[in-house]
Image (spheres, helix red, strand yellow):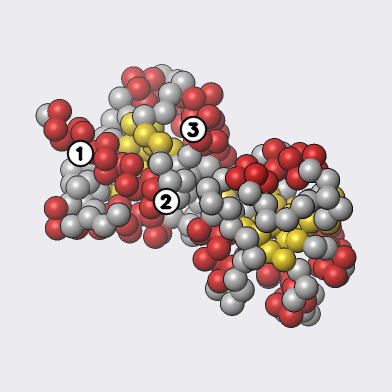
Amino acid sequence: MNYDLSLSPLAGKTILVTRSVGQSNQFSDRLTSLGANVIEMPALEIGPPNSWEALDQAIANLSSFHWLILTSTNGVEYFFSRLEKSGQNQTALTDLKIAVVGKKTAQSLQKQDIKPDFIPPNFVADSLVANFPESLTGKKILFPRVETGGREVLVKELTAKGAEVIEVPAYESCCPQSIPAAAEYALVNNTIDVITFASSKTVQFFSQLTSHIFTYNPENLARVCIASIGPQTSKTCHSVFGRVDIEAEEYTLEGLTNAIIKWANHQDKDI
């Protein structure tokens, strides 16, 4: 969906973006181009897992796998970085089929000059199992993923359909140590209209990072619009905040942007 940027549909709105360092730029730039005042507050830090042993061992035995499943850009980047570190390249994946979840993951894979064999129609892991293009019985699947805190449903459903899933930690996500001064000032002084969340972990870590603010000023959070990228993130928002005000219809950052624009249009009509 394209909008006339000259109309600045988000003019006058201050939006807090909680994506991790290095992953927020494109989203923030898009919101800014639509007229929003964007404040970045990374609620997630990405780094290596505690050990590379499991991933390195899997890479050394790639020929034993039928499928490689990638569900995040982080998974793609760390997997291929480790593949290169092992002295191999894309040719090691010639006989391996690759499935990805989400447009961003597919785009990240395309940067490696690789086209995935399967992308599920909906940008959620559950859709991958429901629409898998072949029988999973007897298939050995490599799943590089976040070390802790990831959803278990994908592995359970693949296993239930007869697959052998080898999970290996490819990266870890953790809570930052502090809040940027501009973000803290805006939260304390009630100047934020929308807070965006693109994952469950950003919801949980945001809550940890801001507990000292909202414990004493719960009304500050009550007046802010909570915007979620999709159902799983919304579930966590309900658990942590008791509500969700905006949910993307398409579970992508573009979908989240469009949902915020729709919300802003309603706000303007009500004024």
Residue 253, label in figure: 2
* 198 relative position to 145: left or right: left
Residue that mark 1 sits on: 265
* 270 relative position to 22: left or right: left
Query: Which picture quadrant has residue 152?
Result: top right
Taking the image as drawn, is residue 55 in sight? yes
Under mark 2, the amino acid is: Leu
* 76 relative position to 111: left or right: right
Residue that mark 3 sits on: 234
Under mark 3, the amino acid is: Ser
- The residue at the point 38 percent across, 45 percent down is 256
Q: Secondary structure at mark 2?
A: helix
Q: Earlier in the sequence, mark 2 or mark 3?
A: 3
- Give the CA separation, mark 2 to mark 3: 14 Å
- Give the CA separation, mark 1 to mark 3: 22 Å
Q: Is residue 37 above or below residue 94?
A: above
Under mark 1, the amino acid is: Asn
Point out residue 243 in the picture as x, y percentages from the top left corner: 43, 24
